[in-house]
Amino acid sequence: MKLLIATRNVGKLREFEQMLAAFPVALVTLDAFNNVEEVEETGSTFEANARLKASGYARQTGCWTVAEDSGLVVDALGGEPGVHSARYAGRHGDDNANNHKLILALAGVANRSARYVASLVLSRPDGSVVASAQGVCEGSIIDEPRGKGGFGYDPYFVASGETRTNAELHPNEKHVISHRGQGLRSFLPLLRAQLGLTRPE
């Protein structure tokens, strides 16, 4: 059975592959299909965007589809960058520009509380949404980047209870606390149930 992971984000895909390594399905990405039209992320919440993507790509490809929308929510910035996290500085996926804008926006701001949020949605091949889950990782933003791992805002994000940034954590450590890891742990039982899969021995 094929399961489409509806992303072209290499960092997200790598995390999905690591966390679903024991899952008894063949993971495919949008790059496996020709002439797939991009689904516009017009929702005002992470879940709304994940639903749009899961449903839209499932209908186009005829595959069971998992879509995820996630981002960074910073309290002192009124929730920004939020659903615009990947394109905060204007160009989609420009991590350096996004981080630069974030740190400039927080210059002189004492309150650095923030959280990563991830919403995951499963759609049947006909586009009907049948499962969803959310994960949240609380933390704070620092001024200077640390670490070479992760992606996005990870070099500037320190999870609550940690002294290292997400970019300094080993992938297995990050999966334990990350928003995506928490969301997937809630999501996997729903995914197994919908796909009629049993847990591997």
Image (cartoon, helix red, strand yellow):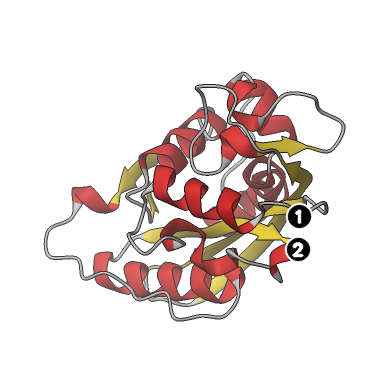
- Please indicate whether residue 191 sits to the left or right of residue 134 in the image: left
**For residue 74, which quarter of the picture?**
bottom right
Residue found 41% across the figure and 76% down from its top? 127
Residue found 62% across the figure and 37% down from its top? 156
Q: What amino acid does circle 1 point to?
A: Val
Question: Which-is-in-front pick, marks 1 and 2?
Answer: 1
**Separation of residues labelled 1 and 2 (CA atoms):** 8 Å
- Please indicate whether residue 70 sits to the left or right of residue 6 in the image: right
Is 17 placed above or below 188 here?
above
Farthest residue toward the top?
170
**For residue 90, which quarter of the picture?**
bottom left
- Please indicate whether residue 52 sits to the left or right of residue 166 in the image: left
Helix, strand or loop at label 1? It is loop
Residue found 12% across the figure and 58% down from its top? 34
Farthest residue toward the front?
108
Disc tally is 2
Give percent across and percent down for residue 158: 73, 35
Mark 1 near mark 2, Cβ–Cβ under 8 Å?
yes
Crowd tier of the residue under label 2, counting other residues whose Cα lies within 10 Å: few below 14, some 14–19, many 20 or above: some
**For residue 175, which quarter of the picture?**
top right
Q: Is residue 118 visible?
A: no
Q: Dot 2 corresponds to which residue?
A: 76
Quadrant assignment for the C terminus: top right
Q: What amino acid does circle 2 point to?
A: Ala
Q: Dot 1 corresponds to which residue?
A: 109
Crowd tier of the residue under label 1, counting other residues whose Cα lies within 10 Å: few below 14, some 14–19, many 20 or above: few
